[in-house]
Image: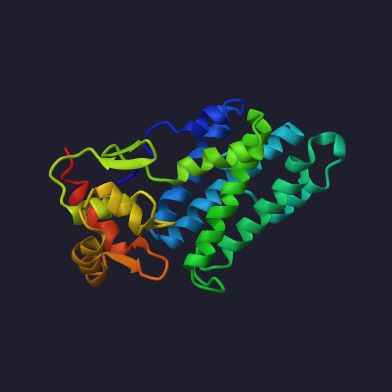
Amino acid sequence: MNTFKNKSPLHSALNSIPANFRDKIVKSYLEIKQRYLESRYESVGLSAGKFCESVLRLLQSLLTSSYTPFGQQIPNFADECRKLIQLPKTAGVESQRVVLPRALSFLYTLRSKRGISHVGGDVDANPIDSATISRIADWIMCELIRIHHSLSLEEAQALIDTISTRSLPDIWDVAGKKRILRKGLNYRQQVLLFTYQDIQNGVLTEDLHQWTEYTNLTTFKKSVLKPLHEERLIEYDKESEIVYLSPSGIREVEEVILKNSR
């Protein structure tokens, strides 16, 4: 299931950026977030490469009034970033001229050295690399929004945070609570759907109990969470009382629960 098919608020936030750059940047960024949530670590790196190349072309255009055409290979990514860093101060604001190119260079190097973009990388793609890629991409998007939408860094981060959470029509956010609007889902299916919405951070046990409106918390843990944990559909961390959805749980949601959605 692709949860990012609809027009993203990022398009509005970056409306001042020409569409040929904006569309590619937003598309590749959302692919990074989607694939990271799905634990598709190699695919995260591939999307990161497209993201870096699109943002670099934007910076080239903004700072030098020319850029490597889309469809034409960028000969040496690090060198192109260095060219921007070495531009005079009059070329543009420091963030676009120095900070963003350095962030792009690091991100591009990371995905190239982890067995992501080609066979023979130094280290296989893994969750930590993918999490780093995802967060750096977040920061880059925040910075672009801050510059081109006159938002503070905090406001830009708030927008990014909303994008990073899966939007599901079956879940209603109301008065600080969440409710399942779809009829016929049992408690275990509701738990899977709630945790699917925030795979990275997990969901507090107490929240799941309140949102599902299960009568007794102790029984909820024993009768709902424990079986799901034993089936490896979730990871129920009793110490932190946080529930995380597993890759098997993701498949259960996407191939069974959402597939049968009206």
State the image coordinates of residue 179 (x, y, percent, origin top left). 28, 41
Instruction: Please give left or right for residue 9 compared with residue 219 in the image.
Output: right
- Give the x, y percent position of residue 238: 36, 70
The image quadrant that residue 146 belongs to is top right
Q: Which residue is found at the position 20% from the left and 57% from the top?
A: 188
Q: Residue at x 26, y 64 (%)?
A: 233
Would you identify the image quadrant in which residue 203 lies?
bottom left
| Colour treatment of the image | rainbow
Judge whether residue 73 can be spotted in this image: no
With respect to residue 164, does 131 lie above or below? Answer: below
Which is nearer the eye, 203 or 9? 203
Residue 127 in sight here: yes
Q: Is residue 230 above or below residue 157?
A: below
Q: Residue 173: horizontal and vertical position, in percent? A: 35, 37
Q: Nearer the viewer, residue 37 or 66?
A: 37
Quadrant in which the C terminus appears: top left
User: Which residue is at a point 18% across and 41% down the rendered structure image?
Assistant: 261
Specify the farthest residue to the left: 184
Task: Residue 235 in the image: state x and y as whole percent.
Answer: 33, 67
Question: Count of labels shown?
Answer: 0
In the image shown, does 36 or 238 lie closer to the viewer?
238
Answer with left or right where residue 71 lies relative to residue 260.
Answer: right
